[in-house]
Image (spheres, coloured by chain):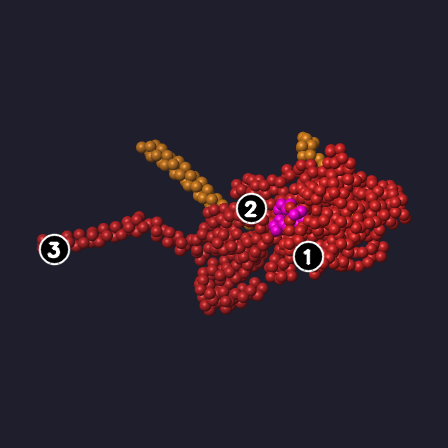
Amino acid sequence: MRQSLLQIGFVFFCIGFCLYSYLNEQNALTRVKMQLPQKEKELQMIREEMRRLSYQVDQFENPSHLIEIAHRPEFSHLKHPALKEILTVPDEALASCSD
Amino acid sequence: MKGISSQERLRLLYLAVFLSFLFCLLVVRFYQIQIVQGEKWRQIALSQHQHILTEPFMRGSFFSNTAVKPGHPEESQPFVLDVLKYHLFVDPASIREEVRPQLALELEARLGGEKVFPELQKKSRSRRIAQWLDQEEKKKIEEWWGRFCLEYRLPRNAIFFLPDYKRSYPFGSMLGSVLHTIQWEKDPKTHQGVPTGGLELMYDSFLKGKPGKRLMVRSPRRPLDMGKVLEAPENGADIYLTINHYIQAITESELVKGVQAVGGRGGWAVMMDPSTGEILALAQTPNFDPIHYADYFNDPNLLEFTKVKAVTECFEPGSILKPLNAALCLKANEELAKKNRPPLFLPDEKIPTSNGWFPGRPFPLKDGRVHRYLNMDLALQKSSNIYMASIIGRLVDTMGDLWYRQALADIFGLGKKTNVELPAENPGLLPTPGKLHPNGKLEWSLPTPYSLAIGYNVLVNSIQIVRAYGILCNGGYAIQPHIVQKIIKTLPDGRKEQLLDHTHLQKGERLLSREVVDTVIRGLKYTTKEGGSSKRADIYGYTEGGKSGTAEKIVDGAYSKTHNISSFVGFAPATHPRFVLLVSVDDPEAKWIPGIGKQQLGGASAGPIFREIALKALQYLGVAPDDPYGYPKGDPRRDPEKADWAREVEQLKRTYEEWNGP
């Protein structure tokens, strides 16, 4: 009798534990799902911020401004290189070198 | 104890039935509201607590051509893009009367003078009180509002921000007249921008996007900027131009400096790749600033700067038409050769040029100075009117007026639109035999060919000239000048769809033979050297060729001697030119410069601008100097013996002196 009671108790305990784990998992998933819209919004904000910063960098790197400062003595040594002076290495060659 | 009588039982029964009946009515009513009318009441409840907001989209951007250096592409660079900003709204109905003055004061202090109080008095749930605030300004206002609404017990969503995209220009007014902009206020129904002109107008159907939808919940606790996106916005397509931002900056800055230096009223410049027709730069001064577009449209004196003068302004080209006429005469020679007939002329032929009388002209043509004899190279070098009129006279006598007119139209496209992708292109005017002017006079009469020979009696736009010289520079092939390289749309799933592709546009049919164009190009190399009319267009360290032109403007119905449109069109390097560049100066100051001559001439006013733009552009494009000894006097690199074309120039000088004296 006692043994039967123990067995039944053990079964109920296992069922209860599995149910508890399942519900716990579902709660965790729901918590993550609830965070998704906020994360999406944050991602969108970061993208917009990147766009804004990129715009500010472009403003600073305005070619008219660069042409103007190129005349300054501290930048007078800078020249546009001729195409034949530039060596280009294809990506495939770089990849094969690293292998 | 007595039992319940039958009468009392009956009363109880009646009461029970009545109560049951009432209960049934309740159930029926419940069924009616919850089930039958359930959807209706659900919608009413939703509209009270939720509403749909428009989610803004990004209008398509314009991108620079960053692949101008073959094999060395750079990162993509926008000329214009949409940047996220915020409009500040207020809900006056949710703000108590007694708080409004204080709220208005606080907001006005933070918004830099915007009048807020009148908006708070309006009977509305939504009034816009500030536009185009950036992220920092929004954050500061939100921080202040968090404290203010708590202190005065106002609902948090009494003020709210709505995002929107603002057209922004990282390079300021660069390419302003070509791109234009959109008006500050968008269409309230479609949320689309309203273009002011230029490429924004031409390609509006590509640049437009589609707004999305966002579900917002009205709740005092939740601010109105949180919500679920029901429909994602669809951004507009991006347009990749053929214009390079760096070359454009060079062209604009040198044009401004050059026009100011000669006291001009304005000017414009067009640079084109002769092998593809890609326009690499298109500048004008004064320029149109898209950021302050309203100033231009509200001032009649500034309205003209909203147009792209390179396509809308037609002018008599003057001497820059002479090389094209020479090419037609050489082409006529080839056609005569096929019929075993003698040529009209030979390029080396000694042609008398002291007599300027031509049939039908009331006055003789004159050259800058009297030349007794010239050949083609000398005529181009000295820009002789009489020489050109002579060979054109032979042309029309042999081939006929119609052949000449057709050749100018069919080969060089004069009088026809180039179909470059800019609005309001003026095709100009090429007189037609037999046709009448509005005043009843014949367009084409006896002296007309002699006027056309020197670039008068014809109206052209700058793109037509650049195209014509492009044909000379690319070996004689037709090309299509264009500004748009490709249009690409990014779909909501991230895939790219190509809507237009002009990258394959190369040379078309052959219009002139190799021999013809090489002969003309050879002649044009003399003009920028010693003895030429455009020495100031000589690009140090590089070979080049070109032609100046000075057209008298018509003032009060007559040609003016002091008002000109002075131009120089050239190409560099002379062999396999990287670009053709036309510079025009509107009304340079007429004065004499010692050692140079008349400033208002094309070679003196537009030539130096050409040189500066071309030199810097060649350096940027990585073109190695091909005339290592061709530098000005005083430069240690100069070697007059070894400089390019030095021997040829010396030989030509000897020929001139032999024919005309020193």
Kind of element beneath mark 2: helix
Drawn side of residue B233 relative to residue B329, left or right:
left
Q: Quadrant of residue B109?
A: bottom right
CA gap between label 1 and label 3 equals 107 Å
The local crowd at label 3, few if under 14, some if 14 to 19, many if 20 or more residues have their Cα within 10 Å, is few
Kindly indicate whether the residue at mark 2 contacts the one at mark 3 (C-beta within 8 angstroms): no
Which of the two marks, 3 or 2, is nearer to us in this view? 2
- For the point 54% across and 47% down, the residue is B205
Residue B405, percent across and down? 69, 44
The local crowd at label 2, few if under 14, some if 14 to 19, many if 20 or more residues have their Cα within 10 Å, is many
Kind of element beneath mark 3: helix
Note whether A61 is above or below B140 in the view shown.
above
* Chain drawn in red: B
Q: Quadrant of the N terminus of chain B?
A: bottom left
Drawn side of residue B232 relative to residue B347, left or right:
left
Q: Amino acid at mark 1?
A: Pro
In magenta, the rendered stretch is: B417-434
Chain of the residue displaying label 3:
B
From the image, state the color of chain A.
orange
Kindly indicate whether the residue at mark 2 contacts the one at mark 1 (C-beta within 8 angstroms): no
CA gap between label 3 and label 2 equals 87 Å
Residue named by callout 2: B206
Q: Amino acid at mark 3?
A: Glu
Q: Earlier in the sequence, mark 3 or mark 2?
A: 3
Disc marking residue B8:
3
CA gap between label 1 and label 2 equals 29 Å
Residue toward you, B254 or B491: B254
Residue named by callout 1: B286
